[in-house]
Amino acid sequence: MVGRIADGLGRLRDALAIEDTPEGLRIVVTRRIDAPPERVWELLVDTRRWPDWGPSVLDVETRSPRIEAGASGRVRTFFGRWLPFTVTRVSEWSWAWRIGPVQATGHRVVPQGDVCRAGFEVPLFAFPYVLVCWWALARIEVLATASSADNRPGRSDATDRSTDQADGPKGR
């Protein structure tokens, strides 16, 4: 068990960087996902899917299920509290949002042929949230590589399988 934890922490360390993003200096956590970038991107921009992969998001209310710059709504967090959000930026393979008055995480997909690298851009003040984002990336990987039948909005069977292995498949 200790070896598995150390292994997971080593992979997390290798997946971290500090980068200058459109929202400023951020901690960026990424994960290689062996799925088409379009499939991963759809998981990130379809608000109906956020509770499937986002450990801190239990529910989403918005006018459109697909994000766009300026879109707003609210999310119910794992604390049970509803918080307003506004999408502040959408570009070809990335987007960012504000939760209440706080510029929150950025989301990105970097295509690498038939696979991709997905990631989150975390504000420096929120550095502990990197662990939640790492877990979310593992859940996104499970969803993106699941069969079509398991990959529908609100279907959490695929992510339930990932909860005991939040550090994902070995060797990545």
Image (cartoon, rainbow, N blue to C red):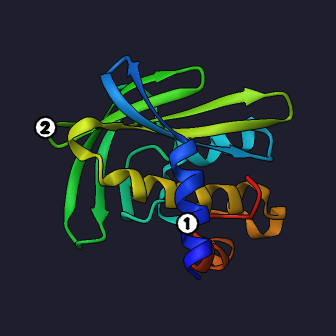
Disc number for residue 6 = 1
Image quarter of residue 28? top left
131 sits left or right of 35 in the view = left
Q: Please state the horizontal and vertical placement of residue 147, each as a whole percent of the image.
A: 84, 64
Which kind of residue does numbered mark 2 sit on? Pro
How much space separates mark 2 and mark 1, taking CA atoms?
Answer: 37 Å
> Which residue is denoted by mark 2 in the rendering?
101
Pick the residue in front: 119 or 94: 119
- Is residue 88 placed above or below 67 in the rendered structure? above
Q: Please state the horizontal and vertical placement of residue 133, each as a whole percent of the image.
A: 45, 53
Label 1, secondary structure: give it.
Answer: helix
Label 2, secondary structure: give it.
Answer: loop
Image quarter of residue 160? bottom right
Q: Please state the horizontal and vertical placement of residue 75, each as a whole percent of the image.
A: 31, 57
Pick the residue in front: 159 or 88: 159
Q: Please state the horizontal and vertical placement of residue 79, each as a whole percent of the image.
A: 23, 72
- Is residue 92 placed above or below 49 in the rendered structure? above
Residue sitting at x 54%, y 33%: 108
- Is residue 73 placed above or below 150 in the rendered structure? above
Which numbered disc, 2 or 1, marks the residue that appears first in the sequence?
A: 1
Disc number for residue 167 = none
- Disc 2 vs disc 1: Cβ atoms closer than 8 Å? no
Residue sitting at x 26%, y 36%: 124
Residue sitting at x 16%, y 43%: 100
- Circle 2: is it few (<14), some (14-19), or many (20+) Cα within 10 Å? few
36 sits left or right of 82 in the view = right
